[in-house]
């Protein structure tokens, strides 16, 4: 009895101080570093409250009112609310909020309409596509034939002519629009016209730009796509998780594909977090956030251009940009490492037609969503651009790195994060 109470009521610090202290260190890292990873963000505390709640104790296989377990009355209401809010936010006929991750959401959409041996046409991974769009080691390559389109060598924007000719040649069952490293607007109507011409389904993977779409800062793929998949943790600023939107005609098949097709019980803490994320994303303040994300990305891109950096495609229309570091004689791998030492977190990323290997790269991907959530504006983007330039101009100068690190910690301190934790 005593042991039971001690076990159930003890804090993490009391039961496992090793893990607690690492979580504290991670919180400190998030506070003191400038977060420029384009796929990251900071979720409101309210969403973390759901993520760390008793919902983790519940099994709820199936869908609202068709659950395979008892005691689901509250959790199925949470799921229904999440579904309704997702449909309303994005103007979709149907939403499935159960996928555990973006990769799983894509798997669900593919499995709903594709058979093994069918062809998938998606963006080349080394030009912006995601692993789940056909990486050789990903399930997509084991099950489907993969055809991939890229960007134009001159403009470094999607070559729609190539998409069209590849579609005619390969007759894909599904065409994927959407990317992990593409700084420009995507023309969904153009993609749909190509899909219609060859009788393919259009799936838009809006994982990166979902927050911009919800906040009216990027055109919505929903009216143009048969399926739209997304994560919730990137620009949408929700919990780690995903969802799929589709036309009414695919609703039943999609739901069956998610469960029991590829998942068992849903992660209810994440579904509750998604519900709150969709509620917040429908508010006027979120529109301001989305507009500010785009403005900040433009300001950072402008600042870096003025300091002599070359940006892939010449700039950005969304929340992210790709720096071509070749003229600076530094690789993406080294740049990521020295910036990290200087308190700026980013990731190395291949640029189109990159001569370096994927683990080295000539590029760096930067995004503005997380710093925007912290409240930073164009002025701070100028400060960050200068700091990046200083570090990458003298990557071996420990004095410069230490000075920038101090400045970045001061900048972080001026935009407090999770003060009550
Ligand atoms: C991040 C991302 C995903 C995958 O998300 P996970 O949750 O990491 O599986 C899928 N598609 C695109 C385009 C992404 O950028």
Image: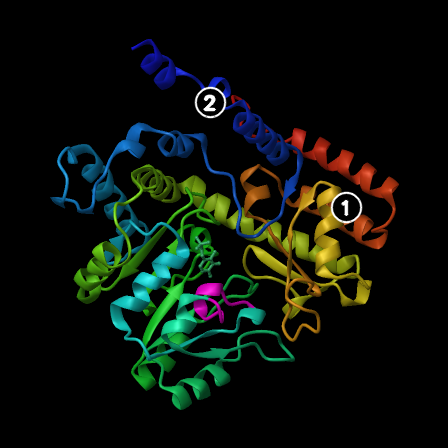
Mark 1, secondary structure of its residue = helix
Place residue 308 in its image quadrant. Answer: bottom right
Does the magenta run of residues contain 149?
A: no
Does the magenta run of residues contain 134?
A: yes
Q: Residue at x 71, y 59 (%)?
A: 332
Which quadrant would the N terminus be assigned to in this image? Answer: top left
Answer yes or no: is residue 283 visible.
yes
Magenta-drawn segment: 128-137
Mark 2, secondary structure of its residue = helix
Q: CA distance from mark 1 to mark 2?
A: 38 Å
Q: Horizontal and vertical percent for residue 174?
A: 34, 75
Return the residue at label 1.
387
Instruction: Give the farthest residue toward the bottom.
Output: 169
Q: Residue at x 54, y 22 (%)?
A: 17
For residue 12, the mark is: 2
* 159, 68: nearer the viewer: 68
* 359, 106: nearer the viewer: 359
Query: Left of 103 or right of it: where is 75?
Result: left
**Up-down relation of residue 20 to residue 195 (above or below):** above
Answer yes or no: is residue 303 visible.
no
Q: Ligand 1 lies in which image quarter?
A: bottom left
Place residue 21 in its image quadrant. Answer: top right
Q: Horizontal and vertical percent for residue 160?
A: 48, 80
């Amino acid at each position: 009895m005593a042991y039971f109470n001690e076990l159930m009521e003890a804090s993490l610090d009391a039961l496992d101080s090793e893990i607690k202290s690492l979580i504290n260190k991670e919180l400190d890292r998030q506070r003191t570093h400038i977060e420029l990873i384009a796929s990251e963000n900071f979720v409101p505390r309210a969403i973390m409250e759901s993520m760390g709640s008793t919902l983790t104790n519940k099994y709820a296989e199936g869908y609202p009112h068709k659950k395979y377990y008892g005691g689901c009355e509250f959790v199925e209401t949470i799921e229904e609310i999440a579904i309704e809010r997702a449909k309303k936010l994005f103007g979709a006929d149907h939403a499935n909020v159960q996928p555990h991750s973006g990769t799983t959401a894509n798997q669900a959409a593919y499995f709903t309409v594709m058979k093994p041996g069918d062809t998938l046409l998606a963006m080349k991974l080394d030009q912006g596509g995601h692993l789940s769009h056909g990486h050789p080691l990903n399930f997509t390559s084991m099950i489907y034939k993969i055809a991939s389109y890229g960007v134009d060598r001159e403009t470094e924007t999607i070559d729609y002519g190539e998409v069209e000719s590849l579609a005619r040649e390969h007759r894909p069952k599904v065409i994927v629009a959407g990317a992990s490293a593409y700084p420009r607007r995507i023309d969904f109507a153009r993609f749909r016209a190509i899909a219609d011409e060859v009788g393919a389904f259009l799936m838009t993977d809006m994982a990166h730009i979902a927050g911009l779409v919800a906040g009216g800062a990027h055109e919505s793929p929903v009216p143009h796509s048969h399926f739209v998949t997304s994560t919730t943790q990137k620009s949408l600023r929700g919990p780690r998780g995903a969802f799929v939107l589709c036309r009414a005609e695919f609703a039943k098949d999609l739901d069956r594909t998610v469960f029991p097709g590829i998942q068992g019980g849903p992660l209810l803490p994440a579904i509750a977090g998604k519900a709150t994320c969709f509620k917040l994303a429908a508010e006027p303040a979120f529109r301001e956030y989305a507009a500010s994300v785009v403005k900040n990305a433009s300001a950072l891109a402008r600042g870096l251009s003025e300091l002599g950096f070359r940006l892939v495609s010449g700039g950005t229309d969304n929340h992210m940009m790709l720096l071509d570091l070749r003229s600076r004689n530094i690789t993406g791998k080294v740049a990521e490492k020295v910036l990290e030492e200087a308190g700026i977190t980013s990731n190395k990323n291949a640029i189109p037609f990159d001569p370096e290997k994927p683990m080295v790269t000539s590029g760096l991907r930067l995004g503005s969503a997380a710093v925007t959530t912290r409240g930073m504006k164009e002025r701070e983007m100028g400060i960050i651009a200068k700091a990046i330039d200083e570090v990458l101009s003298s990557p071996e100068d420990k004095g410069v790195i230490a000075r920038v690190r101090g400045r970045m910690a001061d900048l972080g301190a001026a935009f407090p994060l999770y003060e009550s934790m």
